[in-house]
Image (cartoon, rainbow, N blue to C red):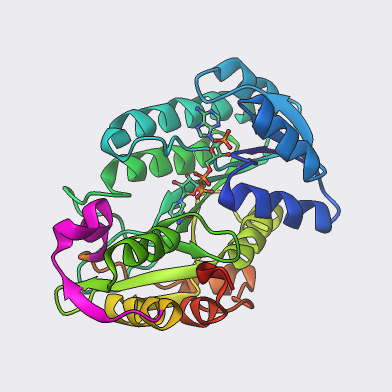
Amino acid sequence: MRVFVTGASGWNGRHLVAELLGAGHQVVGLARSDASATFVAGLGADVLRGGLDDLDSLRAGADAADAVAHLAFIHDDFTRMDLAIEADARAVAAIGEVLAGTGKPLVTTGGTPALGGRTAVESDWSPLGNPGTGPGRDANARAALALADRGVRSSVLRLPPTVHGTGDHGFIAALVGLARQQGVAGYVGDGSARWAAVHVKDAARLYRLALEHASAGTVLHGIGDGGVPGREIAAAIGRGLDLPVASVPAESLGFFGMMLSLDYAAAAPRTRELLDWKPEHPGLIEDLDLGHYFGR
Ligand SMILES: NC(=O)c1ccc[n+]([C@@H]2O[C@H](COP(=O)([O-])OP(=O)(O)OC[C@H]3O[C@@H](n4cnc5c(N)ncnc54)[C@H](OP(=O)(O)O)[C@@H]3O)[C@@H](O)[C@H]2O)c1
């Protein structure tokens, strides 16, 4: 298949490009800057210049492709998630318009819900008022799933808060940076709130399987570890940096403090059954203990 990938230069996108090319697909990656275009071309993909604010570029990419994986998301300002979610909604609608009636596969991206003590499965949605990947993104996911009724083989891949691996610049890398700065590997409260996690290469394989095989209207979960307690993450960071491990006020970790106080346990029972997918790469603690987060 010729697959149009938005967000091809990003953390998940670059691994998806490699996964698709490795499986014999062709890839056209969206790139919004010269630097991203050079990066995407370096991965071995063709490049389509455009952006989330240029809906014609999204329509053109979708029109010329056999399949679309939508991963681009504006992560520039966590205080304006509302704007990022609106841009995502417009992107899903524009891609959907072009794919309607074609039967082509579309996989979009969401986040697993935080259910405060209960493990989230594919049939769950975020409670109202949940920050982070909450109801706003759920609305976009539902819009993508609704395209199934308009002749699109659409699915939504929901990722946990932690997608880890070598080169990660996300939450775990940020927590490592904060621990270095503050001289302590911190967790919030008693550290029992759990974060689900997946290795970036396992997530990339799941995106590919979704494009190849997922039925229209399917929610998929990319879950490796179902729930790692915050204090275990902090302990691994403490080991890696040779720092003390302690409970710290949520405010001292800024945005991450709020995220670490939420219980994000999740599982992927339906996904594993439907797509015969199971994680093959290291879990979060094993990955931290490999040392690459600490420059080793
Ligand atoms: N922990 C996780 O990784 C995680 C967890 C839950 C959900 N997700 C979701 O998974 C998806 C991929 O996340 P990620 O971690 O791979 O993100 P990322 O590394 O921040 O990459 C974001 C991608 O989107 C592109 N992008 C941003 N703004 C754009 C715009 N205005 N026009 C066109 N492209 C734009 C970026 O292009 P540039 O390279 O040019 O900046 C980049 O390719 C997102 O929807 C994210 O919210 C991720």
In reply to whether residue 259 is colored magenta, the answer given is yes
Quadrant position of the N terminus in the picture: top right
The residue under the point 28% across, 48% down is 134
The residue under the point 23% across, 49% down is 131
Left or right: residue 60 versus residue 181 is: right
Residue 5 location (% of width, % of height):
66, 39
Which of these two is toward me, 81 or 144?
81
Position of residue 97 relative to residue 230, above or below, is above
Quarter of the view holding residue 143: top left
Left or right: residue 143 versus residue 102 is: left
Position of residue 43 relative to residue 247, above or below, is above
Which of these two is toward me, 117 or 283?
283
Asked whether residue 138 is in view, the answer is yes
Position of residue 208 relative to residue 106, above or below, is below
Give the extent of the magenta segment: 242-260
Asked whether residue 66 is in view, the answer is no
Considering every residue shown, the one lying at the far right of the view is 24
Quadrant position of the C terminus in the picture: bottom right
Quarter of the view holding residue 54: top right
In reply to whether residue 236 is colored magenta, the answer given is no
Position of residue 161 relative to residue 279, above or below, is above
Residue 119 location (% of width, % of height):
31, 73
